[in-house]
Amino acid sequence: MAIIFNEQNKTYTIQTKNTTYQMAINPFGVLLHTYYGRKIENDNLAYTVYDDMSPFTPKTEDIKGDEVWARIDHIPQEISCFGCGDYRESSVNVRHADGTMGLQPIFVSAEIKNGKYSLEGLPAFYGDEGETLIVTLKDRVYDVYLHLYYGVLPEYDLITRALVIENKTSSKIHVEKALSLNLDFNYGDFDLVSFEGRWAQERRFQRTPVAHGKNQIFSTRGASGHIMNPSCILCSKDATETNGDAYALAFVYSGSFLISASRNFNDNTRLVMGINPENFNFVLESDESFQTPEVAMTFSYNGFEPASQNLHKAIRNNLCRGKYKNARRPVLINNWEGTYFDFNGDKLVSMAKDASELGVELFVMDDGWFGKRDDDYSGLGDWVVNERKLGCTLSELASKINEAGLKFGIWFEPEAINEDSDLYRAHPDYAFKMPNRQPTLARHQLILDMSRKEVRDNIYNQLCKILDSANISYVKWDFNRNITDLYSCEVPAEKQGEIYHRYVLGLYDLLERITSRYPDILFESCSGGGGRFDCGMHYYMPQAWTSDDTDPIERLKIQHGTSFIYPVSTMGAHVSASPNHQTNRKTPLKTRGNVAYFGTYGLELDVNKMTDEEKAEIKRQVAEFKQHYELIQRGEYYRLRSPYEFDSLYCVWQVVASDKSEALVCAVKYRTEANTHPEFVRLRGLDENKYYKVNGGKIYQGATLMYNGLMLEQSWGDYESQLYYIEEVK
Ligand code: GLA
């Protein structure tokens, strides 16, 4: 049993393999949060909740007497509401029919179930092996119920949290804030690690103290976005990769989000996470409810590394779905950086033929094959093959590529529309636009109102027509701008605050329909690179294009940051041309390959232009990647030396097989200095007692490699890299 109720203490304790989470019902029915951290047996941990003496702390008197039932501004709770004395960042705000705002949630009942809950219409971790706790609270006055969902996957130390707000009053209410998680600590000296960025610079590691005041990570863009990722790690000051407390949290959602961490006057800490309340206002009629998405959290007392590894396993095994969750994904070539819009069918076939010689297995035709689309000013919305440009039908092109020995894949941007398109001319109301304003363009395009079924159906039918017309094995689902002009022409003014979320629900509905109709297609998510890289999208698509920046040196930081939350198997990574198109940097082909190995590895260049020597190197890489595929994709990931270490010349990381029989270490030299000394890197995760052969040569004991270190080969030149295959000697 992962969830235990103690009748005497009135505690609900969630036990995972290495962690404990506890809540307690106080004598007045307030659901306290009493502990989350390293495993403790089923003790009563409510003794840590102390009283606050400040006369400025609001206190609510018990109805029957003058006993103080809660100094709500100060005590750690499982849910926090604005209006009745808690001045901290709240997780829920409801405006009642009489215009008042506020909730005082009191315990009503709880239920423990086998299996982890699922959420209708929303992505969520799954697992029959898990358990679910549903705690129901009710406002002290109004018939508004809060159902707190906790899912537990004990093996990965994973706990999820979602919330349902139910209106049982006879009038309508407005939900103005509905965050999924409220995590309180009645002490506080934390740092917050988050992943910030911009286009072509996604998910760079950022660490800031959680000070008095609010530390907010957020998106208001209608998508999770490039700028901040919907994930974070709340950690102790001493936390490193291998030491200290680390709470890693990921929001399973692809729209606007808010993560707010703050330290209160008594030095207690609160972290809330959920849908961004900016432009959010959900109307609940009598008997209606609102379901939030879920947050997944894991805790490690040994630093970031185990927390990342827990999330990696949970995302790989209990979030990603479909055939390609486990099946080996084909090595692909994508024509985008090779040709951009300038291609025809013959060119693509000629690229496919050359790629086939190198062991590549899938050809992806990127943007430009449909409608009127020779640049990014027109065509989006018209998912009709441009046969004149291709010189043949789609089915014929797919056959030619199949004959060359490759599977065939295709790019779509289903949520977008250009004003210069037949779809827009026929249905201008399909795009988000405000009645009295000129819509704001980005990349010359608008966004379709996916909250409307009619719009979704139109796109669904167009996509199915294409996917049914040819032998298509892969889809890249792009989203190249964020939302502005949020207004849906079908709903009344009062409900416009629902549209941001309804857009995401509509997107999920469309993704569910498409991915379940085509179970054999491999789907890759993309948003101008990694602008919607989140657990919500990974539920539908096991991989996402990590960044439009394919420079391997830039990728060190991008993939490093991404790896704190997301597994290697989700990170689209390609070898591209040198000099790089985003940075103009020249890098060795070997390094481009070594970095792309720790993702899904593919090519993104004009293979026809490569020299014989380069082709031979790619052929070697494809073979090497396939050889180590399982190890790379399913191994435990270790960040041995960060790209942010100022004095280090190398960025180094490692994957280790779960049975510790093999490992792969990659070291990239990002800066050369004269007269350097040899570098030693201490490996991790090996078996101390096993013996390992390094790159088929010398044999070392696991303990030696971990405690004394692997001596890197001396190399010359910036951006050189080395790969070490470490194999157990039996
Ligand atoms: C985005 C993607 C690229 C490519 C282009 C096509 O920028 O991230 O990989 O597909 O769109 O327009």
Image (tube, rainbow, N blue to C red):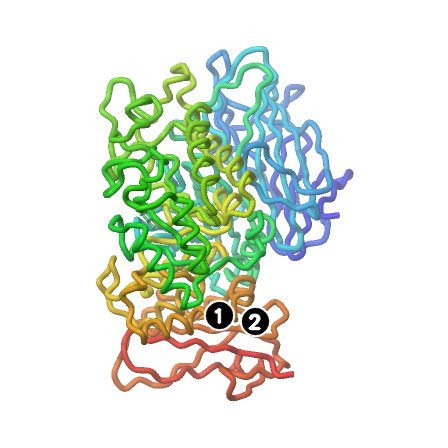
Badge nearest the viewer, 1 or 2? 1
Q: Which x, y percent locates residue 323?
A: 58, 50
* Image: 663 above or below 400: below
Q: Which x, y percent locates residue 693?
A: 55, 84
Gap in angstroms between the C-alphas marked 1 and 2: 9 Å
* Image: 285 above or below 387: above
The local crowd at label 2, few if under 14, some if 14 to 19, many if 20 or more residues have their Cα within 10 Å, is some
Q: Quadrant of residue 155?
A: bottom right
Q: Which x, y percent locates residue 132?
A: 68, 40
Q: Is residue 413 visible?
A: yes
Residue at screen point 43% across, 76% down: 723
Q: How many marks?
A: 2
Sequence-earlier tag: 1 or 2:
1
Q: Are marks 1 and 2 in contact (CB under 8 Å)?
A: yes
| Residue at mark 2 | 685
Residue at screen point 73% across, 38% down: 113
Quadrant location of the C terminus in the rendered image: bottom right
Amino acid type at image mark 1: Gln
Determine which of the numbered discs, if any, sits on residue 38 in the image: none
* Image: 218 above or below 189: above
Residue at screen point 70% across, 33% down: 110
| Residue at mark 1 | 654
* Image: 3 above or below 444: below
Q: Which x, y percent locates residue 441?
A: 24, 33
The local crowd at label 1, few if under 14, some if 14 to 19, many if 20 or more residues have their Cα within 10 Å, is many
Q: Nearer the viewer, residue 674 or 181?
A: 674
Amino acid type at image mark 2: Gly
Q: Is residue 141 visible?
A: no
Circle 1: element type: strand
Circle 2: element type: loop
Q: Nearer the viewer, residue 211 or 408?
A: 408
